[in-house]
Amino acid sequence: MKAVRLALLGATLVVFTAFARQVAQPAAPTADSVVAELKAGNEHHTAKKYLHPHETPARQRELASGQHPHAAVLSCSDSRVPPEIVFDQGLGDLFVIRVAGNIAGQSELGSLEYAAEHLHVPVIVVLGHQKCGGVTAAVEGGELPGHMPSIVNAIQPAVVKAKSMPGDLVDNAVHVNVAMVVDQLRGTKPVLSEAVEKHQLRIVGAVYSLDTGRVEWLK
Ligand SMILES: [Zn+2]
């Protein structure tokens, strides 16, 4: 009888330990769940009904031991498009790379590879926006001082492609630029391309509207 009771106790402990482990380590987020959360966060932003998640002192303390962001965002530096606010995210949620024109040079690629390889983010969002100054400069052409040509030159292929499209040239170039950077990232060997092939990483394009605050997700 004692042996049976001990066996039962043992079995209960095994079940409880497995349960505790499940509770302590929530399932890793999938690309679908992350995109759904970003879409929901953007709804909060457009309605100006923010949840402001993950901004507590406890969250800050928890993050001191390590970060586990669920998405990387390559966005424009434009002050009107801060990813954490646009997607209503908090501390430790997004791994953000910001550069004028949301282009992907060597440093941006290295940062995104780190997010994919070491932080295992399931999603990279390339986030462009309406009336982007970098894209507008590429459309207008002309001489720029200092290092600014490096940015405009990177956007130029998108402008060339957009010129054959009907509608507003800057708006079209913004969309084409995002789509081209998405394609570039998907094809960047070896880290990003392999993660995409193995379905460990999804790379999506999006364009933010300054008028409405809404994020349009590109196909
Ligand atoms: Zn911009």
Image (spheres, rainbow, N blue to C red):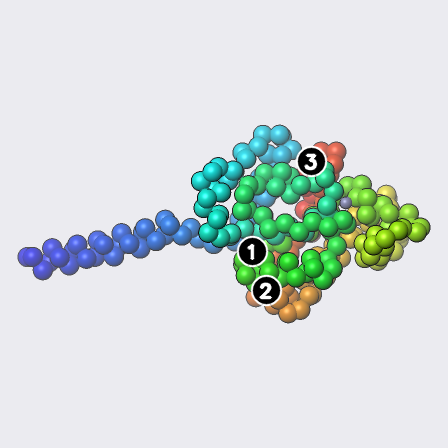
**Does label 2 point to a residue whose CB lies under 8 Å from ligand 1?**
no
Which amino acid, by three-letter code, is at mark 1? Val
Distance from disc 2 to disc 1, alpha carbons, whole Å, reads 10 Å
Which amino acid, by three-letter code, is at mark 3? Gly
Q: x, y (%) of residue 178?
A: 74, 52
Q: Please state which of the two labelled residues, at mark 3 or mark 1, is closer to the viewer.
A: 1
For residue 117, which quarter of the picture?
bottom right
Q: Is residue 111 above or below residue 90?
A: below
Would you name the residue on which mark 1 appears? 121
- Badge 1 marks a residue whose secondary structure is loop
Which of the numbered marks, if any, corresponds to residue 195? 2
| Numbered marks: total | 3
Which of the numbered marks, if any, corresponds to residue 213? 3
Q: Earlier in the sequence, mark 2 or mark 3?
A: 2
The answer to whether residue 49 of the structure is visible from this angle is yes
Left/right placement of residue 105 relative to residue 165 reads: left
Find the residue positioned furthest to the top: 48
- Residue visible at 64% across and 43% down? 83
Distance from disc 3 to disc 1, alpha carbons, whole Å, reads 25 Å
Which amino acid, by three-letter code, is at mark 2? Ala
Distance from disc 2 to disc 3, alpha carbons, whole Å, reads 31 Å
Q: x, y (%) of residue 116?
A: 58, 60
Q: Is residue 40 above or below residue 106?
A: above
Q: Earlier in the sequence, mark 3 or mark 1?
A: 1
- Closest to the observer, 143 or 121: 143
Left/right placement of residue 188 relative to residue 175 reads: left
